[in-house]
Every structure is written in C-alpha cells, then in structure tokens.
Amino acid sequence: MSVFKIDPKLDLRLERVVDVKPELVWACWTMPEHIVKWFTPAPWRTKSADIDLRPGGRFNTVMLSPEGQEFPNFGCLLEVVPQRRLVFTDTLLEGFRPAGKPFFTGMVEIQAEGAGTRYIATAIHGTEETRKQHEEMGFHNGWSAALDQLVALVKTLPH
C-alpha cells in the first residue's frame, strides 16, 4: 500500500482486516462528529476534534481521562489521499508551524479487501525512547480498542 518502510526500532504498527467498507472507515477518520465517538479507547473519550482536511491543515483533538482531566493534542496533516491514506503529526502545527515537543507521526492506510477493509495504522517515532514510551502507554491495546470502536460506530451509520 505504502512506500513507507517500517523500522521496528522506531515504529509501531497495527494491521487488521475489518468487516466494514473503506469509505466509512475514511469518514470516521476525517469527520470530527465521528472522531469524537470512537477515537479514544474507553473509558477515556474524545471531548472534541477539529480537522482541516488538507496538507498543512489542523488535526486537533482533546482527550478526556475517566477522572475528567483534559489532554489536548494539536497537530498537522501532512498527506491526505482520499479514501486511502491520512498522515498527521504532532511535530508540526497547522500551517506546518514547528511544534514544541514532538512525539510521533501517524499514518492510517485503508484499502478494500473482499467485503471489508485492510486497515494499517503506523506510529512513526524519531527515537527508540519515544517508541518505547508509546508502546508502554498501551499502543497495541489502545489503538486496537479504538479500531473496534470505529468498526462498531460504522455499523450504526447509514450505508
């Protein structure tokens, strides 16, 4: 799907085939009204999402802990290939402005497979330390749970 080559020392990846259509997966990733319903694994939730769907556009979310603490995440879209690939980063802010403390770049790739979608989410890190930190924060379980929530949401949307 992608020309990107994963580096196991720096990157984390979730790859699954899900039983929902690619265009609905894309809608869930690109429409703020959908993102707030699935993006953060329960019992956490996404309080808000603000997306300007173009390279250089913003990809901002605010996560809410079960205790009510807010965690804002501000970033920039690097690549938008409709229905195929979305690349975003916290290394930059909207308009490609440098951010204060980068953590990772995310890439979501979707492709029709049978009646469903091959879904590949990659977290690209600049150092082994940030990769390890992301893994210890629960990348695999968290991103997998969020994908389950996305699939459950898609099944409630009009087709």
Image (cartoon, rainbow, N blue to C red):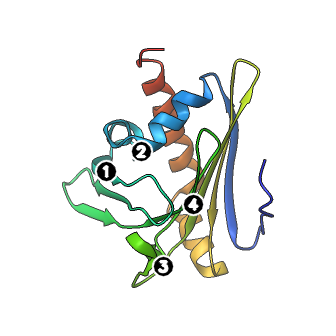
Residue at mark 4 to residue at mark 3: CA–CA distance: 12 Å
Q: Residue at point 57% right, 67% down?
A: 105
Instruction: From the viewer's side, name the closer residue of 27 and 150.
Output: 27
Q: Residue furthest top?
A: 159
Residue at mark 4 to residue at mark 1: CA–CA distance: 16 Å
In the rendered image, residue 108, in percent from the top left (x then y), is placed at 61, 50
Residue at mark 1 to residue at mark 3: CA–CA distance: 19 Å
* Residue that numbered label 3 is attached to: 102
Instruction: From the viewer's side, name the closer residue of 44 and 25.
Output: 25
Mark 2 in CB contact with mark 1 (< 8 angstroms): yes
* Residue that numbered label 4 is attached to: 106
Q: In terms of secondary structure, where does tag 2 sit?
A: loop
Q: Is residue 93 visible?
A: no
**Along the polypeptide, which appears first: circle 1 or circle 3?**
1
Amino acid found under the numbered disc labelled 2 = Phe
Amino acid found under the numbered disc labelled 4 = Gly
Q: Tell me where residue 119 sits by quadrant.
A: top right
Residue at mark 2 to residue at mark 1: CA–CA distance: 9 Å
Mark 1 in CB contact with mark 3 (< 8 angstroms): no
Task: State left or right for residue 145 relative to residue 126.
Answer: left
Q: In terms of secondary structure, where does tag 4 sit?
A: strand
* Residue that numbered label 1 is attached to: 49
> Tag 3: Cα neighbours inside 10 Å, few (<14), some, or many (≥20)?
some
* Residue that numbered label 2 is attached to: 39
